Each structure stands twice: as C-alpha cells, then as structure tokens.
C-alpha cells in the first residue's frame, strides 16, 4: 500500500485490546492485538524478518503477556514480552 509493506498475522476476531507502537508515517509500526492478556494478532510495518518469525512463534501458542510496559518499547521483541509456555 503506497510503497509500504503491511503485514497482518493472526486472527483479529474477538480481540479486546489493541496497543500500538511506532507509527505508519515513520514506516515502523507494531499493533499488538490481545484477548484476555494473550496475543492473538499482530500488525507490522517495517519490522525485520527475525521480528516476524518471533511474532509468528508467539502467536502460534497465543502466549500470555508478561511485560505490558514493553509493548511500546521500540527495542522489545515478541519473545521478550510474552511467555512462550502459555
């Protein structure tokens, strides 16, 4: 879209919270879609392949959020924010 690659992973149906990090205008955005404190979807713009791989891993198990403040930290990675054990 307008020369920007946009990725949506997971299922938006039934999410009860959305936390945004970064901005579309800056070309660096993450939208964390949560349901009951678990990650159910992610919107990404300008993220690395490694970030996308981690996000996919966390989504696969609908991991529980362990670091709410980190959701807006541009240095935080999906694996650092969510418990993989569920």
Image: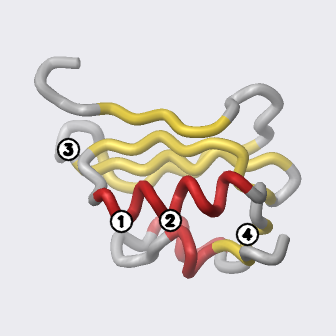
The spot of residue 56 in percent (x, y) is 56, 53
Q: CA distance from mark 1 to mark 2?
A: 6 Å
Q: Position of residue 42 (x, y in %)?
A: 55, 45
Question: Going 63% across and 42% down the picture, which residue do you hit?
Answer: 41
Along the polypeptide, which appears first: circle 4 or circle 1? 1
Q: Is residue 61 above or below residue 29?
A: below
**Is the Cβ of the residue at disc 3 closer than 8 Å to that at disc 4?**
no
Q: Specify which label sits upstream in the sequence, 3 or 2.
A: 3
User: Is the Cβ of the residue at disc 1 closer than 8 Å to that at disc 2?
Assistant: yes
Whole-percent x and y of residue 29? 34, 48
Q: Residue 85: percent from the left, percent from the top?
A: 81, 77
Q: Which residue is mark 4?
A: 65
The image shows residue 31, relative to residue 49, as above or below, that is above
Please give the count of numbered marks on the rendered protein. Answer: 4
Q: Mark 4 or mark 3, which is nearer the start of the sequence?
A: 3
Residue 50: mark: 1
Q: Say few, some or many: other residues with alpha carbon within 10 Å of mark 3 (under 14 / 14 to 19 / 20 or more).
A: some
Q: Which residue is mark 2?
A: 54
């Amino acid at each position: 879209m307008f020369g920007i690659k946009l990725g949506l992973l997971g299922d938006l149906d039934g999410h009860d919270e959305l936390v945004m990090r970064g901005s579309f205008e800056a070309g660096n955005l993450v939208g964390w879609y949560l349901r009951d404190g678990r990650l159910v979807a992610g919107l990404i713009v300008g993220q690395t392949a490694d970030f996308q791989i981690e996000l996919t891993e966390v989504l696969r198990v609908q991991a529980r959020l362990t670091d709410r403040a980190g959701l807006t930290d541009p240095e935080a990675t999906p694996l650092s924010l969510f418990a993989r054990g569920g």
